[in-house]
Image (cartoon, rainbow, N blue to C red):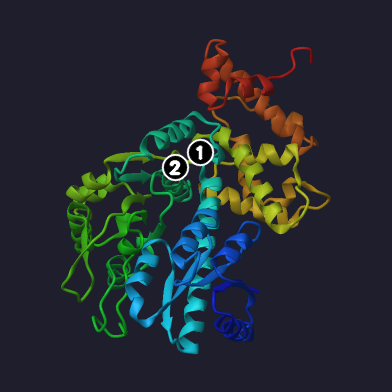
Amino acid sequence: MPRILLVDDEPSILSVLSTLLKGQGFDVVPALGGGKAKTFLQEESVDLMITDIRMEPVDGLELLNYAKSTHPDMAVMVVTAYGSVETAVEAMKLGAFDYVTKPFKVDELVITVQRALEYRRALHENERLKAQLESRYGLENIIAESDAMRKICSMIQRVAPTDQTVLIGGESGVGKEVIAKAIHANSVRREREFVPINCAALPEPLLESELFGHVKGAFTGAASDKEGLFEVANGGTLFLDEIGSMSLGLQSKLLRVLQENEIRRVGGTRQIQVNPRVIAASHEDLEQLISEGKFREDLYYRLSVIPLVIAPLRERSEDVLPLAYHFVRDISTKAGVELPEVSSEAQMLLESYTWPGNVRELENALRHACTFADGGVIQPDDLPARIVTRAKRGAVSIPGGAVPDTGGLSGMSLKGFLREVEKSYIIKTIQDHGGDKESAAKSLKVSLATLYRKLPDPEN
């Protein structure tokens, strides 16, 4: 139940308003005068304060200043006489949400109170989402065991504080939106909106309306004016995913926005100034699309001021298990169940698979495994069947003659088989690099510590 502090130095008005607001289901705390309200706020907090302006010895403006300094997230409404609107406007400049004039209509007062409380709830939700964004997409929370991802994190640190456009490349499922959110979360724009849109998911007319907005009557169904995402993301970040699917006509309009920082709504005539940071992404080779006449070269250079390319998961195998542990922990936490372990056999399969669907496929595989895991341990049979089959096939098809004679391994457990294959491949790779373990580790795309951990015990 929302709690309201009601402040007035006239007992009769205080009594009437208290009865009215309690009847609307609010928890009302009456305070006779600004002094008592200040005393109350020294120890308590409320969702909304409604205060008269003309009070003595502590008037409404003084109380408003005090309340905003001690309770900055509290909404404040002021009540003023009909002839003192200028004072009410001054109060709004000082941070009041709105004002009502005496004599006021009951419906008007109640609606304004509801709007003020909804505004406060929206602010709290916005702060919660910002905190979630910063905690989830802070650089310390990006899985970056591989050199490739560490370089990406280093680039984010350097790019995020700037206002340059960024073009993120990489196969589907590598985590391009995660990187875009990390850039936003570590930028000076993190207090404003991060607005994503998949350009491939909408037909051209609808995509244009979503990006630039429209005016009432612009087309059938346009019953009212609508803000576009460039306006919604003003001061924040607009993430244009799958930019390569955008039509040439829309590309021209997007180029103008990037050049002029202004948009015109569909069906409108007025130019609207906008200032979002644009981050674009594509799994397609935009330079190839340019050569085919499907993408504007001038737009490409506008977008790719800072290019980032995320390597596919198969090229950064060191990230597979850390990502797997991250997903298992996240899935079990959200489900409210005990964190399962990942058996060594399952770990080997995860490392042996090539992950054509990249990080997204890995996450889905772990969701599948967590659903079917029994006894608090994820076993190979809990993973999707296609992954187990292809991982085994991949393990047997290692190049360079490093695979042991499978005939001599018949009857061996899957765990033992995979260990033998891995051991043989590591030894063969080290031999191919003249015994240089550091060079072999780079070739295998694992750290030197990981290589030593996986080496056979010399005493066996």
* x, y percent for residue 449: 63, 21
Please give the label number shown on residue 186: 2
The type of residue carrying mark 1 is Leu
- Mark 1 and mark 2: span between their CA atoms? 8 Å
* x, y percent for residue 161: 37, 39
Q: Element type at marker 1?
A: helix
Instruction: Evaluate whether residue 384 shows in this view.
Output: no
Look at the numbered discs 1 and 2 and tell me whether their residues touch, using CB distance below 8 Å.
yes
Image quadrant in which the N terminus is located: bottom right
Q: Would you call the spot at circle 1 few (<14 residues within 10 Å), some (14-19), or many (20 or more)?
A: many
Image quadrant in which the C terminus is located: top right
Q: Element type at marker 2?
A: loop
Choose top left, top right, bottom left or bottom right for residue 455.
Answer: top right
- Residue 265 vs 319, above or below: the answer is below
Q: Which residue lies furthest to the right in this view?
A: 375
Q: Residue furthest front?
A: 57
Please give the label number shown on residue 153: none
- Residue 371 vs 114, above or below: the answer is above
* x, y percent for residue 173: 48, 50
* x, y percent for residue 123: 50, 62
Please give the label number shown on residue 139: 1
The type of residue carrying mark 2 is Asn
Q: Would you call the spot at circle 2 few (<14 residues within 10 Å), some (14-19), or many (20 or more)?
A: many
Q: Look at 47% across and 66% down and name the residue there.
A: 59
Q: Which of marks 1 and 2 is nearer the N terminus?
A: 1
Between tags 1 and 2, which lies in front?
A: 2
In this rendered view, identify the residue nearer to me: 290 or 157. Answer: 157
In this rendered view, identify the residue nearer to me: 141 or 236. Answer: 236
Q: Look at 66% across and 28% down and name the residue there.
A: 422
